[in-house]
Image (tube, rainbow, N blue to C red):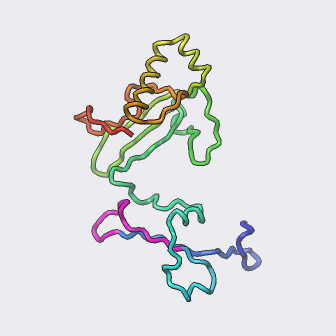
């Protein structure tokens, strides 16, 4: 139980501090998009609100999410291109079952971890290719070992990282070694792979 809440009765039924509502205004016959108007209100649970206009209680969806610890709009379609980012999961048999990267994670990321980042376009009508990039986390000691024992491999990883920084404009730290020649690139048109989307 949360000591902030007032309670009623022997069973300690919590009395909410406020009520809220979020409305997405979708034009008739249309699908919801990120340009739709959103109205959010948060009203205190007391006897004073009837004397005020509902517009006095306007707020933002972010405020509602913070106050309730809920995630709004997860059942609605995202923007029309609908890109999903999986920031990282381990590569191996555990792949999707073992990702140390999630909101609020305190899982350690260690040098030598081979991981994968995915960018997956998802559209209800149009198909597309996707980006699934492998990379290795390498501290200074591991980078030195690779340079000494496998100089050609290290040179390829460094060239890929430079391309990502200088051509695509991504922030790639020295400790991240890209394993593919097309890291950071989505080529969505199956018949025209020369045209790409750079993130």
Does residue 59 lie above or below 95 as drawn?
below
In screen coordinates, is 149 left or right of 77? right
Q: Nearer the viewer, residue 93 or 20?
A: 20
Does residue 190 lie above or below 77 as drawn?
above
In screen coordinates, is 173 left or right of 163? right
In screen coordinates, is 47 left or right of 147? right
Pick the quarter of the image with the N terminus: bottom right
Task: State yes or no: residue 36 in magenta.
Answer: yes
Q: Nearer the viewer, residue 112 or 165?
A: 165
Q: Nearer the viewer, residue 181 or 170?
A: 170
Residue 15, image x, y percentages: 67, 76
Q: Residue at x 46, y 17 (%)?
A: 155
Farthest top residue? 149
Residue 195, image x, y percentages: 26, 35
In screen coordinates, is 83 left or right of 93? left
- Secondary structure that dominates the magenta span: loop
Q: Residue at x 52, y 29 (%)?
A: 176
Farthest right residue? 10
Please state the extent of the stretch shown in magenta in the rendering. 26-41
Does residue 55 lie above or below 84 as drawn?
below
Q: Residue at x 47, y 35 (%)?
A: 171
Picture quadrant of residue 46: bottom right
Task: State yes or no: residue 185 in magenta.
Answer: no
Pick the quarter of the image with the C terminus: top left
């Amino acid at each position: 139980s949360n000591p902030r809440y007032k309670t009623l009765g022997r069973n300690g039924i919590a009395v909410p501090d406020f009520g809220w509502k979020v409305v997405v205004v979708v034009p008739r016959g249309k699908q919801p998009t990120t340009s739709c108007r959103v109205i959010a209100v948060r009203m205190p649970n007391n006897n004073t609100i009837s004397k005020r206009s509902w517009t006095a209680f306007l707020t933002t969806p972010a405020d509602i999410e913070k106050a309730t610890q809920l995630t709004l709009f997860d059942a609605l379609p995202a923007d029309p291109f609908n890109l999903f980012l999986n920031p990282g999961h381990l590569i191996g048999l555990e792949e999707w079952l073992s990702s140390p990267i999630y909101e609020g994670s305190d899982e350690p990321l260690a040098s030598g971890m081979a991981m994968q980042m995915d960018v997956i376009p998802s559209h209800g009508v149009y198909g597309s290719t996707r980006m699934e990039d492998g990379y290795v986390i390498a501290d200074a000691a591991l980078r030195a070992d690779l340079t000494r024992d496998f100089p050609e491999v290290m040179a390829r990883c460094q060239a890929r990282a430079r391309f990502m920084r200088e051509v695509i404009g991504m922030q790639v730290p020295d400790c991240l070694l890209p394993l593919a020649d097309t890291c950071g690139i989505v080529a969505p048109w199956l018949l025209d792979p020369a045209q790409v989307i750079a993130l």
